[in-house]
Image (tube, grey):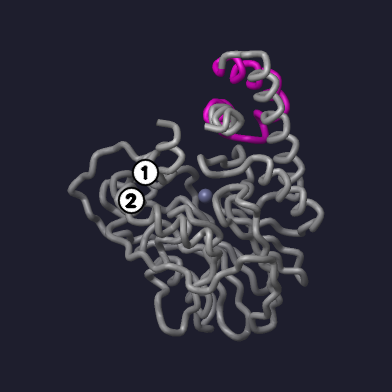
Amino acid sequence: MVKLFQCMSFFLFLSNACVSASTSPVSLKLTAIKVSDNVYSIVAPSYGRPTAENQGWNSNSHFIITGDGVLVVDTGSSESIGQAIKNAIQDVTEQPIRWVVNSHSHADHWLGNGAFKSSEVEFISSSLTLQTMAEDGPADVKAFQKMTQGITGESPLIYPTTMIDKSLKRQFGHEEVEFHLAQNGHSPGDIYLWLPNQRIVLGGDLLSTHYLPIMTPRGNVTNLIATLKKLEQLAPKSILTGHGEPAPKSAISRDIAFLTSVWKGVKTGLSQAERVESIVKRLQSSLGPQYRAEYQDFDSSIQYLVEMMVEKQQGV
Ligand SMILES: [Zn+2]
């Protein structure tokens, strides 16, 4: 049962609603916010999973205007959201979109790829991300249709073709970009981008501003903590995330300390045969005073996080 759960797409697991007949096209008008002279973010106002209310738009995209074209990071939950992202980019620059990077395999970050497909566009991610996309993508399209009552539609599965399987630097126009593997911290094959000349990190779902670290069935807690420590050493000026507003620098050390506390708290509980509900309550009361104001979903998500860590520590 648990093995099956771990092999299932994260979104297929979340999806339990019925498909409705509605297939309204998305008519979102998205706006880019300026992060630096040539870096912009399109920040989704809603957090969590795709729903009918948010029309499937629950995740952020970012773009870099390089002088030689535009590099886009993440494309949203559907082809129509991808199109809305593309429109928002074209409101800012006339430079052609030439590169699309998918930070990881979760479908709210890449099912919009179809809107960008052209012989002029190179799609970039990692081999493990590609493998996971291929495993989960068809079911995720269906899961998103269920979650949004059909609004996200039949997004085509457009996969990356350029693989980043080790850290590397690459020049895009006048912008130097470093690609780094995030050690499967949030999901298998996840990558993040570092712009050394601007000290900006584009971190996908490795952290978020006002919400608990997003742990998923195939994430790796200790690797996530290790990756966050690397990010901390980079001392970024700006942190662009997969969900929520750009994060303050303090979010990195906050998430390291919080994840470490929960991980250790779960370990201690399991070593003493403590019941999971008791571990949740204990951590809720010991960590709540410090973190409740930091994480808007502290009380609603701590149980999920603890349960996920219990499964990981039990190796099931
Ligand atoms: Zn994710």
Residue annotated with mark 1: 12
Residue 60, image x and y in percent? 52, 57
Position of residue 49 relative to residue 193, above or below, is: above
53 or 202: nearer the eye? 202
The majority secondary structure of the magenta stretch comes to helix
Residue annotated with mark 2: 139
Residue 257, image x and y in percent? 75, 36
In the figure, is residue 175 to the left or right of 103?
Answer: right
- Separation of marks 1 and 2 at Cα, in angstroms: 6 Å
Amino acid residing under circle 2: Ala
How crowded is the residue under tag 1: few (<14 C-alpha within 10 Å), some, or many (20+)? some
The answer as to whether callout 1 falls within 8 Å of ligand 1 is: no
Residue drawn where x is 67% and y is 31% of the image? 293
Q: In the picture, which quadrant includes the N terminus?
A: top left
Tell me the magenta residue range: 276-305
Report if the CB atoms under discs 1 and 2 are less than 8 Å apart: yes
In the figure, is residue 258 to the left or right of 61?
Answer: right
In the figure, is residue 213 to the left or right of 10?
Answer: right
Q: Is residue 297 magenta?
A: yes
Q: Earlier in the sequence, mark 1 or mark 2?
A: 1
Position of residue 276 relative to residue 106, above or below, is: above
How crowded is the residue under tag 2: few (<14 C-alpha within 10 Å), some, or many (20+)? some
Residue drawn where x is 33% and y is 44% of the image? 147
Q: Is residue 171 visible?
A: yes
Quarter location, residue 159: bottom left
Residue drawn where x is 40% and y is 47% of the image? 50
Secondary structure type for disc 1? helix
